[in-house]
Image: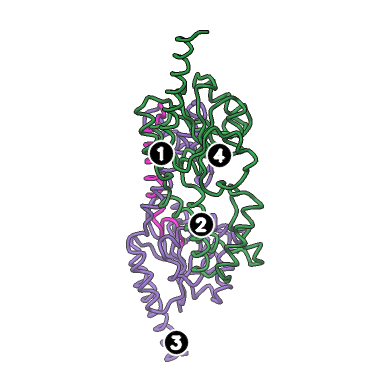
Chain colours: A purple, B green
Amino acid sequence: MIKAVFFDLDDTIVDTTRLAEMARRNAIENMIRHGLPVDFDTAYGELLELISEYGSNFPRHFDYLLRRLELPYNPKWVSAGVIAYHNTKIAYLKSVRGARRTLLRLKKEGYVLGIITDGDPVKQWEKILRLELGEYFDHVFISDELGVKKPHPKIFQKALQKANLKAGEAVMVGDRLYSDIYGAKRVGMTTIWFRYGKYADRELEYRKYADFTISSLEEVPGIVGRFNCEEEKRSSDKEVHPD
Amino acid sequence: MIKAVFFDLDDTIVDTTRLAEMARRNAIENMIRHGLPVDFDTAYGELLELISEYGSNFPRHFDYLLRRLELPYNPKWVSAGVIAYHNTKIAYLKSVRGARRTLLRLKKEGYVLGIITDGDPVKQWEKILRLELGEYFDHVFISDELGVKKPHPKIFQKALQKANLKAGEAVMVGDRLYSDIYGAKRVGMTTIWFRYGKYADRELEYRKYADFTISSLEEVPGIVGRFNCEEEKRSSDKEVHPD
């Protein structure tokens, strides 16, 4: 019997990749507007390369961009980038289509809801609080707070333990086959792969760990409902024919 | 003959202190709203103490606030503080009353305009660019970029040198008697003390270095105009009566 639904945060509940792309494009545009002597495609391409090398949480993207472009350090250009980046991230932060409706429906049907996400705790909470999603979730587990990242079994086990659940009572919904689906399946949770965003066609070797695949979050309540209904049927069938 | 007017940034051109106070109050309020179990006055008092000890540019105010209040670390509360702090700083950033009108008038009258400020270059540029004040200034000198802080003579000398000015051709306008007025006077600049904000009654032992004292920025163009007019008269008097 499923009692709880856990969600990944980035590109499952919050539309992160699209937002980051907009923010980066606007940053480069604003740097050029304030005098960065490089064309858009060159600067944007270099920024993407830099991010893929140093990671998206590296705090000095725009400083390093100038170095890579062999330009002198200029705090005005860095500032122009930072301003446009943050303005975009604040103004255009959005939940994934259908996320709020899905959470509300699951909540009404009595499920315990939670987040299991990687990342910096303050930044992850920032997304949840800015979107005013905090009230939906009974539990929020963030890897950097626990000291262990997905797909390590410990983060899922800790979540189950703190929420007082058995693995068979919990579903994990996420966009990443490796960290979300393979990770949750290994500890015995039911898994729903949300085929969405930049991971829609990646890590497909882990696809066998997905119990269900969806292209819209709004499919989640139906899947969970049918799963529970069938399980109820199976257990009542057993009672009738104990053989 | 005065050809250039340099301004300090914080609490001279940008209304920084008032903004920081609002941002801190809103941060504490939002932390309490999200569950911080402390009353406003206790938390706010502790935050002010922390800032006076660690400085206003210390990046971990809200983490340390929890430690000082003997509360467990909670990224949700930290995030609530960070969000409200940044939202306030972005939404309520304002120039000092009369600043824009004064800059425009000086610009129209043909003066070279500049900023000489302490602080982090990216953060200082952020204030200038967010307020769209960049176009007014021919020169921006920021201590952390030059490696020397006000009132060290080098920052003023470097500003004069880069702007190709003699000390007698430049005015410094600032709210701090020690760093702005004493600093600029030592290299021979004309000084205008803007008696404003939290430094209005501090460092009064340096008051003798102020050539002029104003309570509104709009007095600057008149002072500079009269100064030049009198100097012109003095030099033409000399020509007429070379004695």
Q: Which mark is residue B218?
A: 1
Foreground tag (3 vs 1): 1
- The residue identified by callout 3 is A238
The main secondary structure of the magenta stretch is: helix
Q: Residues within 10 Å of mark 4 (few under 14, many from 20)?
A: some
- Stretch of the chain drawn in magenta: A8-37
Q: Tag 4, which chain?
A: B
Q: What is the C-alpha distance between the residues marked 2 and 1? A: 61 Å
Which marked residue is nearer to the observer: mark 1 or mark 4? 1
* Mark 2 residue type: Ser
- Circle 1 sits in a helix, a strand or a loop, which is it? helix
- Reading the image, the residue beneath label 2 is A179
Disc 3 to disc 2, C-alpha distance: 36 Å
**Nearer mark to the viewer, of 2 and 1:** 1
Say which mark, if any, is on residue B167.
none
Q: Chain of mark 1?
A: B
Q: Who's the residue at 37% across and 24% down the image?
A: B110
Q: Which residue is mark 4?
A: B120
Q: In the rendering, at what x and y percent does residue B62 appear?
A: 58, 58
User: What type is the residue that disc 1 sits on?
Assistant: Glu
- Tell me whether marks 4 and 2 sit on the same chain: no
Please name which of the two marks, 3 or 2, marks the residue nearer to the observer.
2
> Are the residues flagged by discs 4 and 3 from a single subunit?
no
Q: CA distance from mark 3 to mark 1?
A: 88 Å
Whether residue B209 is situated above or below residue A163 in the rendered picture: above
Residue A81, horizontal then vertical, whole percent: 43, 39
The CA distance from mark 1 to mark 4 is 28 Å
* Residue A21 falls inside the magenta stretch: yes
